[in-house]
Amino acid sequence: MKVAVCSAQSYDRQFLLAANRDAHHELVFFESHLSEETRQMVTGFPVVCVFVNDTLDNRVLETLAAQGTRLIALRCAGFNNVDIQSASALGIRVVRVPAYSPHSVAEHTVALMLTLNRRLHQAYNRVRNGNFTLQGLLGFEMRNKIVGIIGTGRIGTAVAQILRGFGCRLLAYDLQPNSTCTQLGVEYVPLETLYAESDIITLHCPLNPQTHRLIDDAAVERMKQGVMLINTSRGAVIDTRAVIVGLKSSRIGYLGLDVYEQEGDLFFQDLTGQVIQDDLFVRLLTFPNVLITGHQGFFTAEALSSIAQTTLRNITEFERDGSCSNEVTVELLRSG
Ligand code: NAD
């Protein structure tokens, strides 16, 4: 099928073209994000393939439907950037890659924890400058620390499996507890308990109306003094302003982010030498105990290969008989 691949980076081309040797679709790559401003660029493409920071709201979807698009193929698991109800009303099907090595994101999550704990981001620069002092680099043992996992789906479970090996005590909150975690010794508790008892809190729930700004002023106030907060899920699960207040009061002792609410204006681009206009983001960069990566949790060879293969398989399936085994439906949206 004729596929418009939006937000295409060189690595997207590399892995999609490799997977397409067997799938034989006609792939046309666009570096731009899909948005209200750029929606005309995909005119006449029955399939539009998008990523996390493409915007598919009602206005964009209406244009796409009028231009002949029948399938949106997400190259990711999250679908918060697509108005699923509008797509359904317009007769556009939406498919995603529900699972592509949750270990990639889980391992990155733990990398953020360890880097912040042992202050590797500071140690790296210090040693390169010839400063071999240790003041300010004091860490703690992960063993016996209490880690609270919010959202124990594929990624949250993989995080629990890794942290079990470190000897952490694991608490969790999820609307649907899973038995793999329970068997690992994860203890499901109310959110209040998780906030109050955890030394480290890590977010692995999807972004939806219930989780939007879940971490707000009230949540931060309930957390332990000096807590480590990690977010590799979606930026808007955190109210950035509330977290900055928490950092300034030292309630939050460490913050690790791979996602940011307004990341669409920043991430996946080289803005070297440009003035960043987002004052909240720039404030975050001033804290020594904040570590930010630019949505790279998924970024492993294994995950990119798996994403490319599943994306093209989703398109082939739709072309063959209209079936979509990885469809995002209104029912899935409602079930969270
Ligand atoms: P998943 O669907 O397997 O798991 C999500 C879990 O969250 C489920 O167990 C669900 O019951 C739970 N949940 C839903 N609503 C909740 C709520 N209100 N409170 C608590 N828990 C709730 O998804 P996954 O594959 O583990 O991915 C989790 C999220 O990670 C995705 O939605 C996506 O936003 C993010 N993600 C980030 C990256 C990255 O590169 N940083 C890559 C992939 C996914």
Image (cartoon, rainbow, N blue to C red):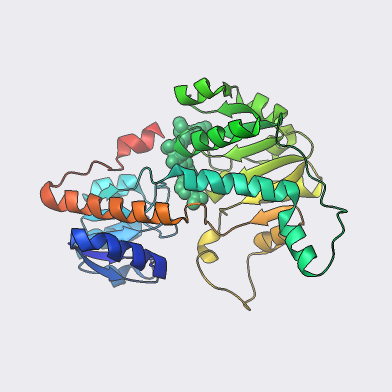
Asked if 284 appears above or below 78 in the picture, the reply is below
Q: Would you identify the image quadrant in which residue 280 lies? A: bottom right
Which is more toward the observer, 91 or 261? 261
Which is more toward the observer, 268 or 281? 268
The image position of residue 202, as x and y in percent, is 61, 39
Query: In the image, is 27 to the left or to the right of 54?
Result: left
Count up the numbered dots.
0
Q: Quadrant of the N terminus?
A: bottom left
Residue at 29%, 48% in the rendered image: 95
Query: In the image, is 36 to the left or to the right of 17?
Result: right
Residue at 76%, 33% in the rendered image: 224
Q: Would you identify the image quadrant in which residue 251 lies? A: top right
Query: In the image, is 169 to the left or to the right of 232?
Result: right
Q: Quadrant of the C terminus?
A: top left
| Residue 233 shows in the view | no
Q: Residue furthest left?
A: 321
Asked if 328 appears above or below 52 in the picture, the reply is above
Residue at 55%, 65% in the rendered image: 266
| Residue 275 shows in the view | yes
Which is more toward the observer, 197 or 116? 116
Residue at 45%, 43% in the rendered image: 102
